[in-house]
Image: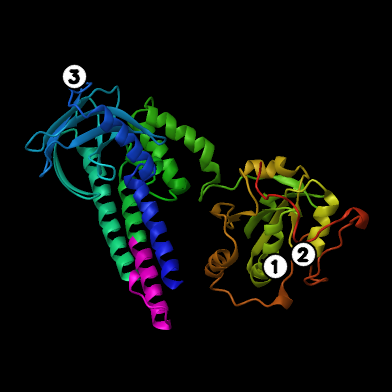
Amino acid sequence: MLKRHLLAILTLGLIVATNFSCNKLSATDIKQDFNQWVNDLITPTKSTLEKVENGFVIKGNIKNSPKNLLVLWELTPAKLIFIDSTRTDEKGNFQLKGNTKEMIFCQLQMGPEASVYFAVDNNSKLNVDMSVVGSFVDYQIKGDELEDSKTLKSLLDMNTSFLKEVKGLEQRAQSIPNTPDGAAQADELRNEYQRLANQRNNFVKEVALKQKKGFIPYFVVSFGALENPGFDMFQHAVNCAKAADPNSKYTQQIETQFNTEAKLMEGAIAPDFTLKTPNGEDLSLSSLRGKVVLIDFWASWCGPCRRENPNVRKLYRRFHYKGFEILGVSLDNDGNRWKGAIQADSLTWPHVSDLRGWQSSAAQLYQVSSIPQTYLIDKDGRIMAKGLRGPELEMVLAKLFADQPAATEGNTNANSNVSASPENGNKTPDIKVDPAKSNNKKDSKSKTDKKK
């Protein structure tokens, strides 16, 4: 069990890192696309773009790889677009050509798993010498218009080094015994993995932030070089792209993506909303500014939500007096069921709802498609994290409030008309409920807790 748990953690990290080198496509998808082109190229033919006179040229040599098939793709966030293909000659030499109206990112693929990346425009004349071992490619690049291609190489080199280190950790994990000493070894490997992951991510961020005009930050954000780029990096990518070429398709893509996604990214100001409390009063998220707030999307009919409530209640009692608040946002349609669940589960924090179910204005604003769902908001109203609950949420809160003494159940008070007060301690507030219409068993018979 210990080995499987550790290997799962390491494998997850490997998948995140490999997304960078596989353009967010699964290895299966890439292999299928690659095999389609293999079938078309069993008989060597001239390049489909050989007649291009004023375009980019990529030529070079692959060590010990005669008659090796190469495919040049344009990278897009959604898929790979074919540009050109060829085979190496008897000595491993090759040449590929293309024509583009603007700078584009390309992937040169030598097999289902081996690839390198370039940034090219019609002035690019690149010479590449490569050595391939499995999925790892060692290469040197020379020529004209090299700056962004060299930057991509530095990112790829870092990623390759990271993947090799992770593979080493995986091999070490195989020999860990299922003993107390093995548990200590597992913790050591987890810490080592996290150190390597942080080192890699910091390098990628540093490279992206160094560029003030260009599309490297766009690459980092759009092609998965960072698992969670965050609001500031996203904004930087937009600014750099606009400075380089406001009419580029990359600029248009990143601006559209930013306008769609950035409002809910870490570091963004949490979108405000105002809904009714169980007693019919208006309550806004912004009114809780100055506290660390957990927006908790739930419903009385959601079994997983109700089962999670005891854990949430425990965290509220522990951290509330330190400045932690919860705002429960219900996706209920029935007011009595909602109010009954609040009382039944002793949820002493503020609650709001517009009783519109999945059409809840707050749920749509926060793009909630399944519950339970949470957003953690800092004291300045910025999004800190999404989807935290259980031990993970407890760990984050413990770090945030580490400089304050531990709380006890008896000194937790809430300051809202739908939460505990100094007078009633931790008691659930009085909420008018029609008992005849309330049915709030903790294990709901709802068929699903996901939006249809």
Mark 2 / mark 1, whichever is N-terminal: 1
Mark 2 / mark 3, whichever is N-terminal: 3
Q: Are marks 2 and 3 in contact (CB under 8 Å)?
A: no
Q: Is residue 91 left or right of residue 223?
A: left
Number of the label disc, if any, that sits on residue 250 = none
Number of the label disc, if any, that sits on residue 310 = 1
Q: Is residue 235 left or right of residue 38?
A: right
Q: Nearer the viewer, residue 389 or 441?
A: 441
Residue 49, relative to residue 359: is it above or below? above
Number of the label disc, if any, that sits on residue 345 = 2
Identify the residue shown where x is 82% and y is 48%: 334
Residue 401, relative to residue 158: is it above or below? below
Where residue 221 sits in the image (x, y, percent)?
40, 43
Q: Nearer the viewer, residue 278 or 175?
A: 175
Mark 1 / mark 3, whichever is N-terminal: 3
Q: CA distance from mark 2 to mark 1?
A: 8 Å
- Pointer 1 local density, CA inside 10 Å: few below 14, some 14–19, many at least 20: some
**Magenta range:** 174-196
